[in-house]
Image (cartoon, rainbow, N blue to C red):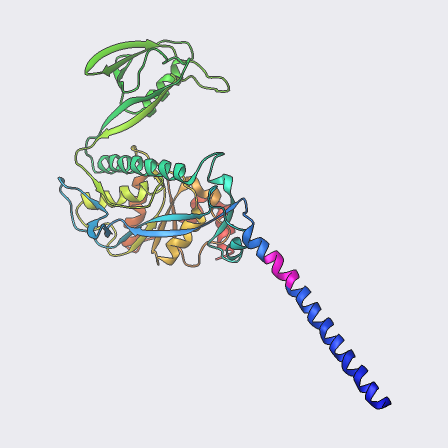
């Protein structure tokens, strides 16, 4: 009888111990699962910036089941070329209306090609994804026209400039003098050749000094006068109008792309156009990737997402990566292994770098960014 009671107590103790073990496991699993579930559900104030699609501007794209060249000239003499000339993009995952969860950010922590960035780096307060997409679409369209102007000028063609008033600021020098749609033709008797010329002459005249503008309004020529003022918080005189710049190109240019926005493909577009408009293949079969804005005068401007575009260029097996000289401060400590980088400040420099690489010659590399950047990148590649 005593032995029977003893074995009963032993069984009960074992069951109690097993229950306590199961309870501890449940608590441990819960302690892990609950934070994970919360991290997967709670939105974060961050986005992920990563390499996006790569497009060969000398190749073709399929749009609505039709195969079209990315860049073409319907009414200009063009020449065959060879090689690959990639424009690079960056994807931004997350927006004010579709926020990324904390858990979804984790893969970017361990991927050097991705960056976790504050939402405010990409979206202004109150701005939506649709707002940003519309702005990037407009910037892309403008950059294509400007790139074409730069390319035609590089081949020696004449390109006309059309400056027109897009908007007039209230209580400004232009208020009551200029109207949206006015075309600016002359400044103090001289033809207006560029926005830069208009801006330089406005600054040089000083605040309060009258400027005489020759304009076209509704088909009629008019002379008007205004005195630039320095706005509150500003340092330089302004006429108080938003000026839109358009160009009179010697040939129509068609660019076929979808779902890509922003101005950073300008340099690559100019290179592709230049290659099509000049005899002989500039690339001679090599693969070049690049990024940079383009001014109509040929200057290459800085862009965002440099590190992600470097990784995109590397994954595209680029023989040369062209970047703006103005982005030297953003060169990452870790540059993808084997990536040949050429910082450039103008379209002419970009052409020289591509032709040198195609000929197997040396190109100016990261040393152009300065000894500090060169040492930092060389020690990690």
Q: Is residue 131 above or below residue 374?
A: above
Q: Position of residue 316 (x, y in %)?
A: 35, 57
Residue 210 appears left or right of 153: right
Residue 201 location in percent, x, y? 35, 18
- The one nearer the camera, 305 or 296, is 305
Instruction: Identify which residue, 380 or 257, lies in the foreground.
Output: 257
Q: Is residue 279 left or right of residue 215?
A: left
The correct choice, above or below, for 160 with respect to 339 in the image is: above
Quadrant location, the N terminus = bottom right
The reply to whether the magenta stretch includes residue 32 is yes
Spot occupied by residue 342 in the image (x, y as percentages of width and height): 38, 48
On the rendered structure, is 14 left or right of 77? right
* Badge count: 0
Q: Residue at x 31, y 26 (%)?
A: 244
Segment colored magenta = 30-36
The magenta stretch spans residue 349:
no
Q: Residue at x 37, y 13 (%)?
A: 175
| Residue in the picture at 35% in, 21% down | 167
- For this rendering, which residue is in front, 109 or 27? 27
Residue 295 percent coordinates (x, y): 32, 34
Q: Main secondary structure of the magenta part?
A: helix
| Direction right: furthest residue | 2
- Residue at the outermost front position: 1
Q: Quadrant of residue 223?
A: top left
Q: Can residue 121 be seen here? A: yes
Mark yes or no: residue 364 visible.
no
Left or right of 117: which side holds 134? left
């Amino acid at each position: 009888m005593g032995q029977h009671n003893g074995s009963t107590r032993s069984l009960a103790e074992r069951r109690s111990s097993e229950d306590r073990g199961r309870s501890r496991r449940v608590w441990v699993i819960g302690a892990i699962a609950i934070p994970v579930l919360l991290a997967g559900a709670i939105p974060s104030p961050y986005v992920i910036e990563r390499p996006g699609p790569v497009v060969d501007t000398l190749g073709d794209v399929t749009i609505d089941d039709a195969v079209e060249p990315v860049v073409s000239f319907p009414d200009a003499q063009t020449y065959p070329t060879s090689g690959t000339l990639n424009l690079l993009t960056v994807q931004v995952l997350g927006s004010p209306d579709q926020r990324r969860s904390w858990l979804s950010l984790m893969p970017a922590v361990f991927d050097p090609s991705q960056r976790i960035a504050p939402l405010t780096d990409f979206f202004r307060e109150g701005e939506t994804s649709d707002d940003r997409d519309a702005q990037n679409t407009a910037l892309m369209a403008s950059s294509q026209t400007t790139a074409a102007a730069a390319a035609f000028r590089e081949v020696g063609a004449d390109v006309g400039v059309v400056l027109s008033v897009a908007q007039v600021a209230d209580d400004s020098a232009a208020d009551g003098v200029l109207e949206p749609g006015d075309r600016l033709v002359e400044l103090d008797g001289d033809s207006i050749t560029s926005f830069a010329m208009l801006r330089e002459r406005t600054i040089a005249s000083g605040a309060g000094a009258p400027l005489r503008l020759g304009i076209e309004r509704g088909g009629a020529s008019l002379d008007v006068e205004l005195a630039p003022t320095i706005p509150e918080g500003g340092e330089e005189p302004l006429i108080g109008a938003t000026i839109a710049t358009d160009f009179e190109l010697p040939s129509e240019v068609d660019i076929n792309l979808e779902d890509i926005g922003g101005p950073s493909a300008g340099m690559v577009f100019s290179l592709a156009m230049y290659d099509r408009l000049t005899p002989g293949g500039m690339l001679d079969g090599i693969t070049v990737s690049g990024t940079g804005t383009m001014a109509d005068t040929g200057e290459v401007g800085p862009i965002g997402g440099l590190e992600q575009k470097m990784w995109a260029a590397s994954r595209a097996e680029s023989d040369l990566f062209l970047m703006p000289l103005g982005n030297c401060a953003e060169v990452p400590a870790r540059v993808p292994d084997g990536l040949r980088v050429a910082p450039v400040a103008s379209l002419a420099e970009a052409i020289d770098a591509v032709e040198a690489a195609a000929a197997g010659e040396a190109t100016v590399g990261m040393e152009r960014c300065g000894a500090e950047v060169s040492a930092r990148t060389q020690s990690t590649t």
